[in-house]
Amino acid sequence: MRGGVFVLGVIYPLGVALLIPVSSAAYASGGVNPIPATLPRQPSAVAPAAARPLQPVTTVLAPSALDQLSSDLASIAAQSGGRVGIGLQELSGPRRTSLSINAGQSFYAASAYKAPLLMAEAQQIAAGRVGPSDVLCYDPSDAEDGWFTDYNPGSCFSRQDLAVRAGRYSDNTAAHILVRYLGGPNALNAYAKSIGMGGSALWIPNTTTPNDLSQAWVNEALGRLGGAPAKGWLYPILTHTASEQGIPPGVPAGVAVVHKVGSMYGTENDSGYVTDGRIAYVLSVAVDGPDEVSGFGVIARVSARIWQYERSRPDYVAPIIASPAPPVWPDRHH
């Protein structure tokens, strides 16, 4: 049948054509090549892993929480309309981070000098060199306007009373009496330098830095300035003071803030120790330029942002989990 012949006519030449190269290869030379015992392995349908291009991976580098904190604090400082110094030192957690924004710059200390003054008193009391009941008498050279007006020639007060007046109420005359009995401004500055305040010149011209104030508070908090007895005497005096501006408004009620504010000549500052269970840190902030209300408002904003960061910080270091490596596809012909 023509249909069948037509089909065979097409297939037959094709079959012959396929046989010709084999015959030619077998007899091209004088001898006959033996057929190899194993046929060559055909190329793998799946390319080996080393030969395959890896899929591109997009990495998004988000700022860390600490980077974001630093950026936010810098923004608060820039928007303040003045010069701002911020020094933070963490005292809790596995990574005790320090953060500084202009914290090495010098600012007018105002009543901030009373913090190291009272630390010196606390350390002496803890060591037994002086006592809270010691009687210290007023001299007219001590006079400066302040909270109390009952200073008269020949009037005397207990060391405890003067410390409470100088710390809790920031009374200037009481502080002057304590400085005089300590040994005067030179003794105060020598003590300040011994506790880490090397960049400060207290009393005259009465300047300090946030870093210096933070270092003093760190040494106190870590028990280096008389230990628990010193802190047991000092902390109640500088907690719930008559001037709860600055750091305290930035943290929730119930959080302990041991601190000392200062305000004079267009500079506001606050420094202290903040603690609440697992959270503990030292913060010092100085603001130069705005009015008093605005200056302490800036400190409160800084305090609130730092508290937000500290509250969300885990107690542990979160492990870094590496992304899984690209899978290696097996060669199925092995």
Image (cartoon, grey):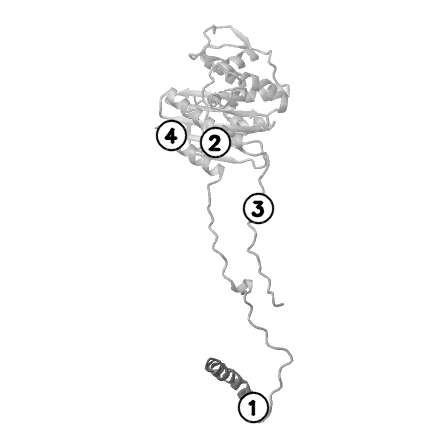
Please, what secondary structure does the residue beneath circle 3 have?
loop
Work out which residue is located at the far left of the displayed protein and give it.
81
Dot 2, crowdedness within 10 Å: few (<14), some or many (≥20)? many
Query: Mark 1 packing: few (<14 Cα in 10 Å), some, or many (20+)?
Result: few
Residue located at (49% from left, 40% from top): 64
- Residue occupied by mark 3: 321
Residues packed near mark 3 inside 10 Å, few (<14), some (14 to 19) or many (20 plus) = few
- 259, above or below 44, in the image: above
Between discs 1 and 4, the one toward the N terminus: 1
Q: Which residue is mark 4?
A: 83
Which residue is labeled 2 in the image? 87
* Residue at mark 4 to residue at mark 2: CA–CA distance: 14 Å
- Under mark 2, the amino acid is Gly
Distance CA(mark 3)–CA(mark 2): 32 Å
The amino acid type, in three-letter code, at marker 3 is Ile
Front one among 334 and 111:
334
Residue 1 image offset from top left, x and y in percent: 48, 82
Q: Is residue 10 left or right of residue 91?
A: left
Task: Mark 4 or mark 3: name the one nearer the start of the chain.
Answer: 4
**Which is closer to the viewer, label 1 or label 4?**
1
- Of the numbered discs in the image, which one, if any, rests on residue 203? none
Name the residue carrying label 1.
27
Residue type for callout 4: Arg
> Is there a contact, CB below 8 Å, between mark 1 and mark 3?
no
Q: Which numbered mark, 3 or 2, is in the foreground of this view?
A: 3
Q: Few, some or many C-alpha atoms within 10 Å of disc 4 (few <14, some 14-19, many ≥20)? A: some
Element type where label 4 sits in the image: strand
From the top left corner, tell me how far across and down residue 25 is, in percent. 54, 87
